[in-house]
Image (cartoon, rainbow, N blue to C red):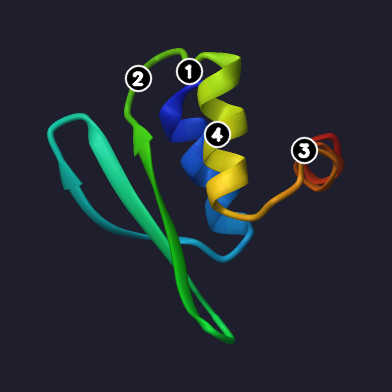
Amino acid sequence: MSGRELIKWLEIFGFIKIRQKGSHIVLKKKIDGGEIGTTVPDHKELAEGTVRGILKQTQISIDEFLEKYHQ
């Protein structure tokens, strides 16, 4: 999965692009207690561990992500 593809999926979960510096794109989402955010590398191929780490930061479970991904 590319960084841009992951960003499109995160936008479905309510994240918005805040800024980009070099090849890293910062996304945030407002939640009840404030906001959560993550940085996604704009690479052609993201390592599995990178995707898992980003999902952990965004508080999206792997199962929840895969459920939407396969719809």
Query: Circles 1 and 2: CB distance less than 8 Å?
Result: yes
How far apart, in angstroms, are the residues tagged by discs 3 and 4? 10 Å
Name the image quarter holding residue 4.
Answer: top left
Left or right, residue 30 beside residue 61: left
Q: Quadrant of the N terminus?
A: top right
Which amino acid type corresponds to the residue marked 4 in the rendered image? Gly
Image coords of residue 51 (percent x, y): 56, 28
Badge 2 is on which residue? 43
Whether residue 35 is situated above or below residue 5 in the rendered picture: below
Q: Earlier in the sequence, mark 1 or mark 3?
A: 1
Left or right, residue 25 beside residue 31: left
Badge 4 is on which residue? 53
Whether residue 13 is situated above or below residue 63 in the rendered picture: below
How far apart, in angstroms, are the residues tagged by discs 4 and 1? 11 Å
Query: Circles 1 and 3: CB distance less than 8 Å?
Result: no
How far apart, in angstroms, are the residues tagged by discs 4 and 2? 15 Å
Element on which disc 3 rests = helix
Image coords of residue 46 (percent x, y): 48, 18
Q: Residue at x 62, y 30 (%)?
A: 52
Of tags 4 and 2, which is closer to the observer?
Answer: 4
Q: For the residue carrying disc 1, how many other residues have a C-alpha within 10 Å: few (<14), some (14-19), or many (20+)?
A: some
Q: Residue furthest bottom?
A: 32
Which amino acid type corresponds to the residue marked 3 in the rendered image? Ile
Of tags 2 and 3, which is closer to the observer?
Answer: 3
Q: Residue at x 76, y 46 (%)?
A: 61
Image coords of residue 60 (percent x, y): 69, 51
Badge 1 is on which residue? 46
